Image: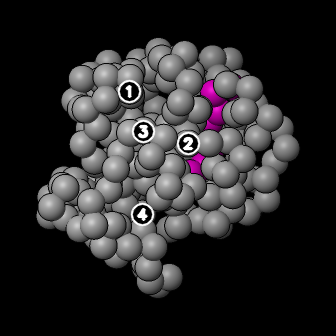
C-alpha cells in the first residue's frame, strides 16, 4: 500500500511553472514516482532519456488529461477502440481500479523521438482527478519511472535524489510509494486487446 498523496502537490504553482517552462521533475504519478517532462517538446524528452540513461529504442508512457489529447499525436480512434477505451479509462470502478497504459499504432515520423522507431505510443489517462487537472495545465507529459535503467524505481524522494542529484529541476515529495507499474495493453484498430503486462 502507499501513503495517500496529498492532492495539493499536483496544484503546486512551482511544479506547474517548471513543467510549462520545459523543466524535468521527479514527482509522484498515479502509480509510482516518475521522471516527468513535456511530451511534445523533443529536447525535454531527449534530456529525460539522458538523465535516466534509458535505452534509446524504448518508448516512454505518456500521461494525458483527456482522450482528445491522442489527436495531438496523430492518433485517430476507430469506433471499436473508443468502446474499449471507455471500459479501460472512462468507467473504471473506484474500488480497486487499476491504472492502465494503452499502446496505439503511431506511424507518424514526426513523433519518432517519442516512438523511437517502434511506430507505437503508449498513453495513460490517470484515475486521479488532481493529476488530470495538472495535465490540463501542462499538456501531455512523458513519465518513465524515477530510476536509472536497470535500477529499482525510487520509493521516495531520498532515493530519487541519490539517483539523479542536481540533474533534474524539481523534486515533489509524495512520501513513500510502494505501488506497482500500470497494467499495459495494446489496443488494435479492430478493438482487440493484447495484454503485455498485468
Secondary structure state at the residue bearing disc 3 = helix
- Give, as a single range, the part of the protein colored magenta: 23-29
Contact flag, marks 1 and 4 (Cβ < 8 Å): no
Contact flag, marks 1 and 3 (Cβ < 8 Å): yes
Contact flag, marks 3 and 4 (Cβ < 8 Å): no
Dot 2 or dot 4: first in sequence order is: 4
> Residue 182 in the image: x percent, y percent?
37, 56
Q: Residues within 10 Å of mark 1 (few under 14, many from 20)?
A: some
Contact flag, marks 3 and 2 (Cβ < 8 Å): yes
Q: How far, Cα to Cα, is label 3 from label 2?
A: 10 Å
Secondary structure state at the residue bearing disc 4 = loop
In the picture of the structure, the residue carrying the numbered disc 2 is 140
Q: Residues within 10 Å of mark 2 (few under 14, many from 20)?
A: many
> Residue 28 in the image: x percent, y percent?
60, 49
Dot 1 or dot 4: first in sequence order is: 4
Dot 1 or dot 2: first in sequence order is: 1
Q: How far, Cα to Cα, is label 1 from label 3?
A: 7 Å
Secondary structure state at the residue bearing disc 2 = loop
Q: How far, Cα to Cα, is label 2 from label 4?
A: 17 Å
Q: Does the magenta portion include 24?
A: yes
Q: Does the magenta portion include 52?
A: no
Please give the label number shown on residue 73.
Answer: 3
Nearer to us: label 3 or label 2:
3
Q: How far, Cα to Cα, is label 1 from label 4?
A: 24 Å
In the picture of the structure, the residue carrying the numbered disc 1 is 111
Q: Nearer the viewer, residue 46 or 180?
A: 46
Q: Check the image and name the residue furthest to the right.
A: 13
* Residue at 47% across, 58% down: 67
Q: Up-down: is 143 above or below 21?
A: below
In the picture of the structure, the residue carrying the numbered disc 4 is 99
Dot 1 or dot 3: first in sequence order is: 3
Amino acid at each position: 500500500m502507499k501513503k495517500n498523496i496529498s492532492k495539493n502537490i499536483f496544484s503546486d504553482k512551482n511544479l506547474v511553472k517548471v513543467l510549462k517552462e520545459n523543466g524535468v521533475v521527479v514527482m509522484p504519478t498515479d502509480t509510482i514516482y516518475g521522471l516527468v517532462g513535456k511530451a511534445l517538446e523533443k529536447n525535454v524528452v531527449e534530456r529525460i532519456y539522458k538523465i535516466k540513461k534509458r535505452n534509446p529504442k524504448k518508448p516512454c508512457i505518456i500521461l494525458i488529461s483527456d482522450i482528445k489529447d491522442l489527436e495531438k499525436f496523430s492518433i485517430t480512434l476507430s469506433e471499436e477502440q473508443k468502446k474499449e477505451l471507455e471500459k479501460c479509462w472512462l468507467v473504471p470502478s473506484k474500488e480497486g481500479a487499476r491504472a492502465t497504459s494503452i499502446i496505439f499504432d503511431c506511424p507518424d515520423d514526426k513523433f519518432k523521438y517519442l516512438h523511437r522507431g517502434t511506430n507505437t505510443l503508449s498513453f495513460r489517462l490517470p484515475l486521479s482527478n488532481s493529476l488530470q487537472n495538472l495535465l490540463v495545465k501542462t499538456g501531455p507529459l512523458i513519465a518513465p519511472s524515477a530510476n536509472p535503467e536497470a535500477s529499482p524505481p525510487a520509493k521516495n524522494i531520498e532515493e530519487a535524489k541519490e539517483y539523479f542529484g542536481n540533474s533534474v529541476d524539481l523534486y515533489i515529495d509524495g512520501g513513500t510509494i510502494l505501488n506497482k507499474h500500470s497494467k499495459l495493453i495494446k489496443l488494435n484498430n479492430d478493438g482487440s486487446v493484447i495484454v503485455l503486462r498485468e
